Amino acid sequence: MLYDEAIKQLDIAIDLMKADSHEIERVNNALVKSQEIITELTASLDFEQGGEIATNLFSLYMFFNRELLESNMKKDPEKAATIRNLMNELRGAWVEANAKVSTESLQSRSGGINIAG
């Protein structure tokens, strides 16, 4: 859900910037909201359980926020679009990983109990 909302906010900011809109406050608000979501994702990382993956995500999230800050200062839709696309790829990877874990969990449960006696 966090990825979805961050992507939605980035879409709003990108569309406004590309339209050469003078709604600077709306662009700023959308980009800041995306940064806040990324900060929340960063804070939720568990480095003990996540190991290298958590460390890599931390670096990626820091990069995202730096790029979005610069995009906001320069009103650069391309930087925001790059982060939006990377976030969408990450979102897809999480969806795929969740589906795989769910499938494996169902398979292990269906084969592990003999109710026939």
Image: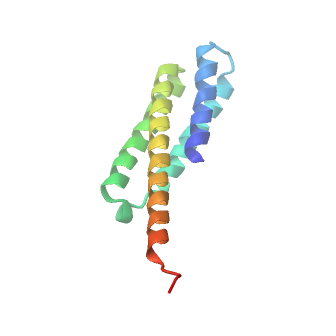
The foreground one among 88 and 43 is: 88
Quadrant of the image occupied by residue 26: top right
* Rendered location of residue 88, percent (x, y): 49, 36
Q: How is the image coloured?
A: rainbow
- Eyeballing the image, is 111 above or below 102? below
* Rendered location of residue 18, percent (x, y): 58, 15
The total number of labels drawn is 0
Q: Residue at x 49, y 69 (%)?
A: 110
* Rendered location of residue 85, percent (x, y): 47, 30
Q: Residue at x 62, y 29 (%)?
A: 28
Q: Residue at x 44, y 34 (%)?
A: 86
Q: Residue furthest bottom?
A: 117
* Rendered location of residue 27, percent (x, y): 63, 26
- Eyeballing the image, is 70 above or below 50? above
The foreground one among 70 and 57 is: 57
Q: Residue furthest top?
A: 20
The foreground one among 27 and 15 is: 15
Q: Residue furthest front?
A: 116
